[in-house]
Image (cartoon, grey):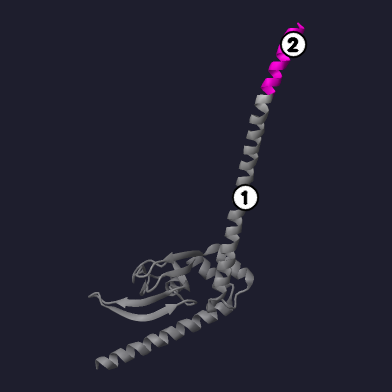
Amino acid sequence: MNRYYGHRDLACHQMSDYLEPVIESRMKSSKLETQGKALTYLLAKLRRSAQYSELNKALRQVPLLESLEESQIDYLVKVGKRITLSSGERLFRKGDPAGCMYMILDGRIQIYMESSDGQAAMLHVLDCGQFFGEMALLDGGKRSTSALTLTPCVFFTLDRASFLNLIATSPELLTRLLSVLSERLRRTDERYLATMAAVA
């Protein structure tokens, strides 16, 4: 009996010696996996925070939004989208449904009209800090002009519901918006009259 138990104890010790490093290795592996997941989550969170801060700062550089409070900028960051386009890409054409307005964070675009024979008449060239596409959002109609990127561009877009909600909570923003629209209309009229005078 003693010899039997001696052999059994020896076998148990040998098995223990074999399994202990395996179990320890797996525990370490599991612990590392857990730590890895936690680190990945933390890095993703930091990345989102950095992107949020960068976008918040970029929106502060848009003159139209200068009067907004911090909570309103935070609202914009949450509901809007940041998109990137290459040079020569068309954002929309006259007659397209109007889903959003655009704020230019980087780059330059051209707003133009197309005639029935395909000729383009340039209306405006807009660059960083300016916005466009808001008219159709105000009246719910279709695009009245076309837009084309002249350089690689970064835009912040805002859909109609968010746009209307924003101007409803910021009278100062609405005043600034109407001022910009009036100035653009005046320049368009002046350009049209100059073109007609040249033709005559």
Q: Position of residue 76 (x, y in %)?
A: 56, 67
Badge 1: how crowded within 10 Å, few (<14), some, or many (20+)? few
SS for tag 1? helix
Q: In this view, does 142 lie to the left or right of 156?
A: left
The residue at the point 60 percent across, 46 percent down is: 37
* For marks 1 and 2 on the same chain, the one whose residue lies earlier in the sequence: 2
Q: Where is residue 1 in the image (x, y as percent from the top left)?
A: 75, 5
Q: In this view, does 163 lie to the left or right of 25?
A: left
Q: What stretch is highlighted in magenta?
A: 1-16
Q: Looking at numbered disc 1 in the image, what kind of residue is underneath it?
A: Leu
Q: Looking at numbered disc 2 in the image, what kind of residue is underneath it?
A: Tyr
Outermost residue to the left: 117
- Which residue is tagged 1? 39
The residue at the point 55 percent across, 76 percent down is: 61
For residue 5, the mark is: 2
Q: In which quarter of the image is the C terminus?
A: bottom left
Front-lying residue, 136 or 47: 47
Front-lying residue, 43 or 96: 43
User: Is residue 5 a member of the stretch shown in magenta?
Assistant: yes
